[in-house]
């Protein structure tokens, strides 16, 4: 996989696949611009090297139809604001204004792109307004490819998908390379999983075992300690005969969970489950709650109550295991962290990771959000920009977009 630094971009039309699939409120105001900020190093590099920059992205799931609420125009505005803040001299201001084009293919797009001058930037409209993005329609890909001389993938968060702009497009552009963000994501994963400083501790949480089963099985080949929390821990606990009340359990995976515990023991991996849980009378932010020690079977779980967080003893035990780590991978919260009443376990774990001094990589999506809610986003080594792509790597799979870059013509 070649890097953008391996080629000359001056005077060339450089198409950059970014991921500006951003969260917005009901008034279409961007509520988190981190994905834009993460692309600034690459964009500034291209500006400094006199490239003609064409940014492409998707937003939401419009299913091949034009949905005004999913337009990328707000992203163009925010990117302009962020670039202007980084302008070093007054002369930089004009070239750091992002021009939005309200389509991504067609005659009007071709005309405006052909008029681009060195150091100018355009952001094209949502790729998913066309069905060709999802289906990799050859004509759609050909039209995109005709707009550029160089293709750069800087969209790690969608690199696990097989969409036109990340798999087919790089195969049709003469020079196709990786951007800084994609390189950083791959390198951080490699440092954490493939070549870690040991001991390596993985903390896996979240709601379902089924969504992370492949990752769990693969991680047994890599880690020294595997900590399992969140609702998915209920299935593992039940497989060991522990009563978890009315908590969420994937009954069809109870036997599988038991096998994973057995396999961990055979491979010398310490697998740690919660030893106490915070049960609630209902799934509600104001629900009555009670911490129950899972070893004290004489302490009954009230009928209908369900676990929404790990308890204080589990937090302390998990923290001790984390403290001894040299490398940490965290994917999935320990409870319903969105509710302050059930955020204690996730806060305790995030604090332990931040204070461990270990090289720590945090999965994107809910885990990245949890790190921010808990105030440790600046105290961990790296927060991934892609939850699904990060999980894909944890499963030991190759990213289709990376494979496409490796097989491209360049």
Image: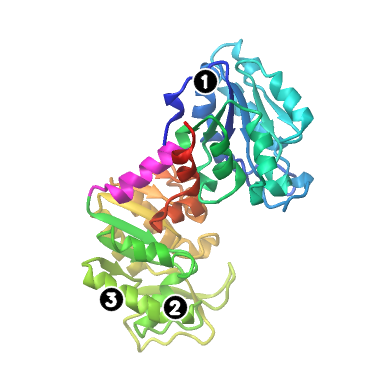
Residue 324 lies, with reference to residue 253, above or below; the image says above
Between 67 and 205, the one lying in front of the other is 67
Magenta span covers which residues? 182-197
- Label 3 sits on residue: 262
Circle 3: element type: helix
Circle 2: element type: helix
Residue 131 in percent (x, y) is at 71, 49
Quadrant position of the N terminus in the picture: top left
- Label 2 sits on residue: 253
Q: What is the quadrant of residue 263 in the picture? A: bottom left
Neighbourhood count class around disc 3 (C-alpha, 10 Å): few under 14, some 14–19, many 20 upward: few
Q: Residue at x 45, y 85 (%)?
A: 301
Between 242 and 394, the one lying in front of the other is 394
Is residue 186 found inside the magenta-colored segment of the image?
yes
Between 221 and 136, the one lying in front of the other is 136
- Label 1 sits on residue: 9
Residue 331 in percent (x, y) is at 42, 57
Neighbourhood count class around disc 1 (C-alpha, 10 Å): few under 14, some 14–19, many 20 upward: many
Query: In screen coordinates, is 294 left or right of 63?
Result: left
Going from N to C along the chain, the mark reached first, 2 or 1, is: 1
Going from N to C along the chain, the mark reached first, 3 or 2, is: 2
């Amino acid at each position: 996989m070649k890097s953008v630094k391996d080629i000359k971009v001056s005077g060339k039309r450089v198409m950059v696949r970014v991921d500006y699939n951003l969260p917005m409120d009901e008034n279409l105001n961007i509520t988190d611009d981190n994905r834009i900020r993460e692309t600034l190093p690459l964009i500034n590099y291209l500006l400094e090297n006199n490239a003609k920059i064409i940014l492409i992205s998707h937003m939401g799931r419009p299913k091949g139809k034009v949905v005004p609420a999913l337009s990328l125009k707000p992203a163009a505005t925010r990117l302009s604001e962020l670039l202007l803040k980084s302008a070093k001299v007054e002369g930089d201001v004009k070239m750091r204004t992002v021009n939005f084009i309200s389509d991504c293919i067609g005659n009007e797009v071709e005309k405006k792109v052909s008029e681009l001058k060195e150091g100018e930037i355009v952001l094209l409209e949502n790729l998913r307004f066309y069905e060709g993005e999802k289906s990799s329609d050859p004509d759609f890909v050909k039209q995109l490819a005709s707009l550029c001389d160089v293709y750069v993938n800087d969209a790690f968060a969608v690199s696990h998908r097989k969409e036109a702009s990340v798999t087919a497009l790089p195969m049709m552009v003469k020079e196709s390379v990786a951007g800084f963000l994609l390189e950083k994501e791959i390198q951080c994963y490699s440092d954490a999983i493939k070549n870690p400083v040991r001991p390596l501790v993985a903390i896996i949480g979240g709601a379902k075992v089924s969504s992370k089963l492949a990752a769990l099985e693969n991680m047994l080949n890599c880690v020294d300690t595997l900590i399992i929390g969140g609702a998915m821990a209920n299935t593992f606990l039940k497989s060991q005969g522990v009563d978890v009340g009315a908590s969420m359990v994937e009954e069809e995976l109870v036997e599988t969970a038991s096998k994973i515990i057995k396999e961990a023991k055979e491979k010398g991996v310490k697998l740690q489950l919660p030893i106490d849980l915070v049960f609630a009378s209902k799934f509600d932010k104001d629900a009555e709650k009670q911490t129950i020690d899972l070893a004290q079977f004489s302490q009954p779980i009230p009928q209908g109550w369900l676990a929404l967080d790990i308890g204080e003893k589990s937090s302390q035990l998990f923290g001790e295991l984390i403290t001894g780590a040299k490398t940490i991978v965290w994917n999935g919260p320990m409870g319903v962290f969105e509710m302050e009443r059930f955020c204690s376990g996730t806060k305790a774990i995030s604090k332990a990771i931040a204070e461990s001094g270990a090289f720590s990589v945090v999965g994107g999506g809910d885990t990245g959000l949890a790190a921010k809610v808990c105030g440790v986003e600046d105290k961990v080594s790296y927060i991934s920009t892609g939850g699904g792509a990060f999980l894909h790597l944890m499963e030991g799979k190759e990213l289709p977009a990376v494979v496409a870059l490796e097989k491209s013509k360049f």
